[in-house]
Image (cartoon, grey):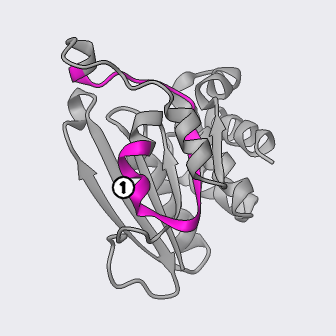
Amino acid sequence: MMNILIAGVGGQGTLLTSKVLGKYALLSGMDCKLSEVHGMSQRGGSVTTHVRIGEKIHSPVIWEGGADMIIAFETLEAIRVKHYLKEDGVLLVNDARILPMPCITGAVTYPEGLKERILKEYNRAYFVNAKEMAQQAGNEKATNVVMLGCLCRLFDFDKALMEEAITACVPERFKELNIKAFNIGYEKVK
């Protein structure tokens, strides 16, 4: 059984990431359930997806303290959902800052020291500059697939099967770019 929580903001590809993980589970002969929470995702608001993979999954929702891994596409989003992580879970964070609307309007300021706080609090926290890696692949919008490469390496998922899941879920014209982004993420995380 594996519980993966994906957190980001609208437009970062959290839903595609969950779709790829679901396809990976099916290709692996496993059951998978997904649950998506779209806040104000169309306006850059929070998006959270629960992905549960196992022999037989009855509920799509991960309980607090039940996530084996959290993939956060933005640092503040990692803080927002960290209570879902198991005590020995892995926190994979895109080292990025996307200002929420209250920060943009000047109502509040973006909190400082979040990365340091996470690294102090969690033994198994990994920060990656997924946007930069995606740019190396050819398009920063492939940040989510870079993160999948990192996840695949950290959890020793079947690399070839994950590549097959990615190619099944992205449009033909973006397959080469996404496989390149995936491999960059896979190679950068140790």
Q: Is residue 62 left or right of residue 43?
A: right
Report the magenta residues as a range: 79-102
**Image location (x, y in percent) of residue 38:** 23, 47
User: Could you tell me the amino acid type at mark 1?
Assistant: Thr
Q: Residue at 36% across / 32% down in the picture?
A: 11
Q: Is residue 22 left or right of residue 49?
A: right
Q: Say which of 57 and 68 sits in front.
A: 68
Q: Is residue 18 left or right of residue 145?
A: left
- Residue lying farthest bottom? 56
Q: Residue at 43% across / 39% down in the picture?
A: 13
Is 84 contained in the magenta span? yes
Q: Say which of 156 and 101 sits in front.
A: 101
Secondary structure of residue under mark 1: strand
Q: Say which of 89 and 117 sits in front.
A: 117
Q: Residue at 25% across / 53% down in the picture?
A: 37
Residue located beneath label 1 in the image: 49
Q: Is residue 114 left or right of residue 43?
A: right
Looking at the rendering, which quadrant does residue 146 occupy? Answer: top right
**Image location (x, y in percent) of residue 141:** 51, 27
Number of residue marks: 1
Q: Quadrant of the N terminus?
A: bottom right
Looking at the rendering, which quadrant does residue 186 occupy? Answer: top right
**Image location (x, y in percent) of residue 78:** 45, 44
Looking at the rendering, which quadrant does residue 52 occupy? Answer: bottom left
